Amino acid sequence: MLDCGLDTTSVLQFLPLPLELKECAGRVFVDSQPEFCLPEKELLDLSTIDVILISNYHCMMALPYITEHTGFTGTVYATEPTLQIGRLLMEELVNFMERVPKAQSATCWKYKEIQRLLPGPLKDAVEVSTWKRCYSMQDVNSALSKVQLVGYSQKVELFGAVQVTPLSSGYSLGSSNWIIQSHYEKVSYVSGSSLLTTHPQPMDQSSLKNSDVLILTGLTQMPTANPDGMLGDFCSNLAMTIRAGGNVLVPCYSSGVIYDLLECLYQFIENANLGSTPFYFISPVANSSLEFSQIFAEWLCHNKQSKVYLPEPPFPHAELIQTNKLKHYPSIHGDFSSEFRQPCVVFTGHPSLRFGDVVHFMELWGKSSLNTIIFTEPDFSYLDALAPYQPLAMKCVYCPIDTRLNFHQVSKLLKEVQPLHVVCPEQYTQPPPAQSHRSDLMLELQPPPMPYRRCSVLGLPFRRRWERIQLLPDVGPVATHLSDVSILLSLVHHSAVLKKPGNRG
């Protein structure tokens, strides 16, 4: 199994605060604790899966649903940063869910005869009967105990049949692409990769060469948005709001893009005369996230690795914390409530605006046009995220920062590594519906890629021409000469190359 990401966009159908259905600003929402859309379970018996390969910490959020509730008895492979930061994100999610003040559980709306009568997008929601509430920390700890750690380029033998190897994908701390290789066939799984120079180790491209099949997924969700341009827009809008006496709210995950945002601000705030503006990072795992980013030195790009040996902290947010320009808190309660001052910049979750401390700040700042909310995470439609809060006076700025491969970059990559066949999601083979004239926003390859869609079953397009077998000594009395072996093989319409043990010739 390649990854087990959690579809969190389902939470956009739920209200952030405490009827089963409630209309708000012309849209209908479910008034219940948010539920998540799980990986497909009907197509395959998940208890039969032997191995799960995790490519990055965003792609493991559904792991407890699989390992704890399906009879799964296999092994999960991931790098150490993926495991540790994935644990933080799961812990944060569980913590957020435990705070949601929802006494009732809405279920009637899931009946097909009722759902089809509802307005969109609830009417069009997929597989709502399988949506589940969040797992517990007990589930998280049990699931992560099944993870076996691997390092980049480490070869792991599976059942004597195939070998899997993680490669740096350049997207996030510890993120990986995977090589799945038998003696004579090679499949590459490329997911969530980046060629940009950010904080992780650069992408390992050369190891992807000579693949029989390359499975491609996890391209940028914002192919027309340049990450550097979005960072510039982020800083300029933040500065304009602070100078006008307003506050800035940045809904974000507790790991990933926030490291780059803080690094960008470190260079920007002095030049923009924002040195006295307080920056707050609020998350149940804020402290751990900032610490982990500093200690995983071997997983960072060369420039940041070299700082560790000076010694200097690889990320500048250490200096921001030391000079009290950046403060972090587990929640809005306790120390934060007594030290909080405005105008300020707050980084907090969840990016969906459905749970977490961000809900409090939407209620606190949403009624003033002096304040600004800046969306940087690309996973959610900002219009859908804001819908339950309408009418809203605060300004909204959309600066999605997605460093993953775009279509131009991936086309260049595929020309360099030259796989025999490419398998990819169907939407990559055609322009976006809203931009049907943009042929540059699709994959055009020769031969054409093999597309797949939800619940489709594909046969990978290669024939196994060779298989390695061993003739044990017990076979001796039957086949003592090469001619005897040739006769046996000809009976089953196979040909072979016979090698003596230790003979490399």
Image: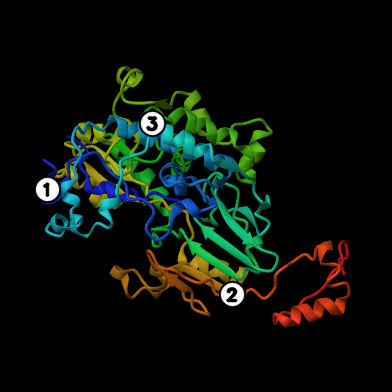
> Callout 1 environment at 10 Å: few (<14), some (14 to 19), or many (20+)?
few
Compared across the picture, whether 245 is left or right of 45 comes to left
Q: Amino acid under label 2?
A: Phe
Residue indicated by mark 1: 25
Secondary structure state at the residue bearing disc 3: loop
Determine the residue positioned at 49% across, 32% down. 290
Q: x, y percentage for residue 405?
A: 49, 60
Which is more foreground, mark 2 or mark 1?
A: 2
Task: Please tell me in which quadrant of the rendered image residue 350 appears.
Answer: top left
- Residue that appears at 74% across and 66% down: 469
Real-space CA distance between mark 2 and mark 1, rounded to the nearest whole angstrom = 53 Å
Q: How is the image coloured?
A: rainbow
- Tell me the SS state at disc 2: loop
User: Which residue in the structure is indicated by mark 3?
Assistant: 283
Instruction: Tell me the mark number nearer the camera, choosing from 2 and 3.
Output: 2
Crowding around mark 2 (Cα neighbors within 10 Å: few <14, some 14 to 19, many 20+) is few
Image position of 436 with respect to 152: above or below: below
Residue 438 percent coordinates (x, y): 36, 73
Work out whether residue 381 or residue 424 is closer to the camera in this orientation and state it. Answer: 424
Q: Nearer the viewer, residue 497 or 241?
A: 497
**Among all residues in the image, which is located at the extreme front?**
477
Q: Amino acid at mark 3?
A: Ser
* 3D distance between C-alphas at marks 2 and 3: 48 Å
Mark 2 lies on residue: 462
Q: Secondary structure at mark 1?
A: loop
CA distance for labels 3 and 1: 29 Å
Q: Earlier in the sequence, mark 2 or mark 1?
A: 1
Q: Which quadrant, please, contains the C terminus?
A: bottom right
Q: Is residue 70 visible?
A: yes
